Image (tube, rainbow, N blue to C red):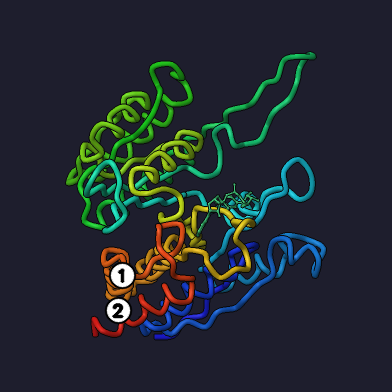
Amino acid sequence: MSYEFTLIEGDGIGPEVTAATIRVLDAAGVDIRWQSMPTGAAAVASHGSPLPDETLRSVERTRVALKGPITTPVGHGFTSVNVAIRQALDLYVSLRPVKSIPGVPTRHEAVDLVVFRENTEGLYSGREHSPVAGVVETLRVITERACTRITRWANDYVRNEGRKKLTLVHKASIMKLSDGLFLDAFNAVTDDYPFLTHEARLIDDVVRGLVIDPSDFDCMVMENLYGDVLSDLCAGLVGGLGVVPGANIGDRYAVFEAVHGSAPDIAGRGIANPTALLQSGVLLLRHIGERSAAAAVERALFTVLERGEVRTGDLGGRANTAKFTDAIIATLHAQG
Ligand code: NAI
């Protein structure tokens, strides 16, 4: 089987970590032709826009993209390309699996969680205004449609990945209408999945529980702001944003990306750690049904990290991106 997917290299270390990821996916024997599309600062120079139409058209055609981080100027310049891509392609699920990585020491062992964040509404609707001087109102939009579709998507994922439990994270005790709507939608959808375990917990109870004993949780679904905060908390449980994968997924399209930024402080030096994007590449392979290749890449990555001989500087090693990538590919080949 051969594939054609969109490649968005991104800014800063983006070209370095995307190149490393593509090398490993290629070494895993998955035949992917990449259509490289302009985005970010380079696209402003060449196309007058950080997100040219032709880039969106490419994802609409290939349906799957691998994306490096994109620099968002602070206070001026273009608005977030990441948010624009999610909105334009209706990528309503932010998928963040968070799993302990061998050889990356953290406070808790054997963490294995999945966060599903609703990506399109809540306080991120961006609807703010100032009715009188010194007062600002932000509209928190919650719709039954959005709550229902992400809850259904999350339940399907839990079932398909052979996981057991889905927790709705909410604050319906205070936001009785908006979070109450999410709670009602959750209860209605979960009736269709009687073979899974479901629970609904207040967000304050969840954050306390996560830092004490993450093994109390399995998969968690929630609205936008809760998901933004909680997914970063979960990343911290396994070593931080530099090692966890992410994906933004809708009914038609999926964009796989690292959670970290474009790291301008180390860009162009060939020393970036490609682990996070490579893990996103593993998610991509699973998404397209290449499950044995996904398992092989994850095994090779984890083996190299566990041995600890070849690591990038952010994980305390001295290897550059190319050497670390070579070690993963050599391990992949040795696994047979
Ligand atoms: P950052 O994640 O780029 O960097 C924070 C620190 O982590 C830096 O010291 C950097 O060198 C290090 N780091 C990050 N990724 C690394 C990697 N793969 N290997 C080794 N070290 C790594 O966060 P920062 O500095 O806040 O953001 C820089 C730019 O990236 C900003 O313009 C921001 O808007 C953008 N950004 C883009 C994202 C995306 O496209 N998904 C996500 C987050 C930030």
Check contact, mark 2 vs mark 1: CB within 8 A: yes
- The amino acid marked with disc number 2 is Thr
Camera-side residue of 4 and 238: 238
The secondary structure type at the circle numbered 2 is helix
Q: Which residue is mark 1?
A: 304
Disc 2 to disc 1, how far (Cα)?
7 Å
Q: Position of residue 23 (x, y in %)?
A: 46, 80
Left or right: where 202 falls relative to 111:
right
Left or right: where 161 falls relative to 276:
left
Camera-side residue of 148 and 6: 6
Q: Residue at x 59, y 65 (%)?
A: 14
Question: Which callout, 2 or 1, points at the residue further toward the start of the chain?
Answer: 1
Q: Residue at x 79, y 14 (%)?
A: 133
Q: Residue furthest left?
A: 195
Q: Which mark is residue 102?
A: none
The secondary structure type at the circle numbered 1 is helix
Q: Residue at x 78, y 61 (%)?
A: 49
Q: Which residue is mark 2?
A: 331
Q: Is residue 257 above or below residue 55?
A: above
Is the N terminus in the top left, top right, bottom left or bottom right quadrant? Answer: bottom left
Q: Residues within 10 Å of mark 1 (few under 14, many from 20)?
A: many
Number of numbered discs overlaid on the protein picture? 2
Is the C terminus in the top left, top right, bottom left or bottom right quadrant? Answer: bottom left
Camera-side residue of 328 and 270: 270
Camera-side residue of 203 and 175: 203
Q: Residues within 10 Å of mark 2 (few under 14, many from 20)?
A: some
Q: Quadrant of residue 234?
A: top left
* Residue 189 visible here: yes
Q: Residue at x 52, y 45 (%)?
A: 119
